[in-house]
């Protein structure tokens, strides 16, 4: 991590084409992003400017490790991915956008992009959405549109998926991740549900890499995609599952788990997202098992963090996590999911 003054001095050359030379001395850090293990964010503006933030400086932490997500790619690779997706969206004249790339700053392992005003989908997952869900549901529809555009970056490749092998692997991974955190495994959560020799056609695409509700900003001109890695190709369901996982992990859905109105909103938001993403295309049979394994990894990570930070004071938090993740795993691994969301 670099102190604020060091960040400003490092990025000034990159901003030379953004503001007049006499205004470079007014560049300052107007705020810092929340503490994150995966990156540091600095929001920059001009001293005395009523507009507030104009640019964002991001320093990825490629040493970050967690069970439920791969380490971030380097700042150089993230900046390259941002430029690539921007070019793709402009060529398609899409309503979806990305923050305007400004510069890669190797001196501090960071890159600069234009600030994008607007709420994220995560910001819409709040208590008033229980009674007035319209904004949230519009937000998840917009997120589905974003993901469809990302997955159109290259032509999709159709390949046969061995569902029997996949089911067996996930049936091993889920219990192992929960057991490693000292959590019990309920019968039926990770049982392989595919008969021998079962296969299906899957679609491999360029993956966003961390497609979460917090990485979709809703602007006046349309949805904006944040933090695309575009580092790997894989089944489209990996990005779909990541979005559902982090949607379900929102504080409203964790603390309100078990309340009929809150659970109904969570299921409705998931249904709207899946309907908008898949449209008239069939949903993969691997979606449920992949989500169950992702839920196990996320629960293990969250539980371990609570135990590490507050072994005694975290009992109530661990109870909330157990109640929430158990309930969601029961739903996801029940027969007929996700069609039962309809």
Image (spheres, helix red, strand yellow):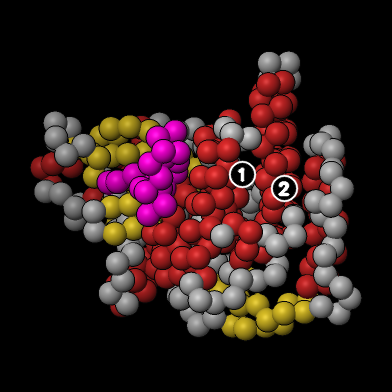
- Residue lying furthest top in this view? 312
The quarter of the displayed image where residue 204 is located: bottom right
Place of residue 85 in the rendered image (x, y in percent of width and height, measured from the top left): 39, 68
Q: Which residues are magenta?
A: 117-138
Q: In the image, is residue 167 above or below residue 13?
A: below
Place of residue 289 in the rendered image (x, y in percent of width and height, measured from the top left): 73, 60
The local crowd at label 1, few if under 14, some if 14 to 19, many if 20 or more residues have their Cα within 10 Å, is some
Q: In the image, is residue 11 above or below residue 201?
A: above
Residue drawn at (89%, 76%) of the image:
196
Q: Is residue 129 magenta?
A: yes
**Which mark, residue 139?**
none
The local crowd at label 2, few if under 14, some if 14 to 19, many if 20 or more residues have their Cα within 10 Å, is many
**Which mark, residue 64?**
1
Q: Quadrant of the C terminus?
A: bottom right
Which residue is at the front of the view, 156 or 256?
256
**Which mark, residue 329?**
2
Place of residue 74 in the rendered image (x, y in percent of width and height, measured from the top left): 52, 55
Which residue is at the front of the view, 338 or 151?
338
Residue drawn at (70%, 62%) of the image:
336
């Amino acid at each position: 991590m670099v102190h604020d003054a060091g960040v400003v001095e490092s990025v000034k050359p990159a901003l030379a084409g953004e503001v007049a030379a006499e205004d470079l001395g007014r560049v300052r850090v107007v705020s810092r992003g929340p503490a994150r293990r995966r990156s540091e964010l600095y929001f920059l503006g001009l001293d005395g400017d009523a507009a507030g933030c104009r640019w964002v400086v991001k320093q990825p932490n490629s040493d970050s490790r967690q069970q439920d997500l791969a380490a971030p790619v380097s700042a150089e690779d993230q900046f390259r991915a941002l430029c690539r997706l921007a070019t793709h969206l402009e060529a398609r004249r899409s309503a979806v956008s990305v923050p305007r790339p400004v510069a890669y700053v190797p001196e501090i392992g960071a890159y600069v992009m234009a600030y994008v005003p607007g709420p994220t989908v995560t910001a819409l997952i709040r208590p008033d959405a229980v009674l007035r869900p319209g904004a949230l549901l519009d937000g998840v529809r917009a997120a589905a549109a974003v993901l469809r555009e990302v997955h159109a970056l290259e032509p999709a490749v159709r390949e046969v998926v061995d569902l029997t092998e996949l089911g067996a692997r996930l049936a091993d991974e889920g219990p192992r991740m929960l057991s490693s955190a000292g959590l019990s495994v309920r019968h039926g959560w990770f049982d392989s549900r595919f008969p021998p020799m079962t296969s299906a056609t899957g679609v491999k695409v360029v993956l966003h890499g961390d497609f979460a509700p917090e990485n979709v900003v809703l602007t006046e001109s349309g949805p904006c995609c944040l933090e695309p890695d575009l580092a790997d190709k894989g089944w489209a369901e990996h990005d779909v599952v990541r979005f559902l996982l982090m949607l379900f992990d929102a504080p409203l859905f964790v603390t309100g788990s078990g309340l009929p109105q809150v659970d109904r909103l969570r299921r409705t938001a998931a249904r709207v997202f899946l309907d908008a993403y898949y449209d008239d295309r069939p949903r993969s049979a691997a979606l449920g098992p992949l989500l169950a394994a992702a839920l196990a990894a996320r629960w293990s990570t969250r539980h371990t963090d609570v135990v590490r930070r507050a072994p005694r004071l975290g009992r109530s938090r661990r109870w909330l996590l157990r109640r929430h993740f158990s309930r969601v795993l029961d739903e996801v691994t029940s027969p007929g999911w996700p069609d039962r969301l309809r």
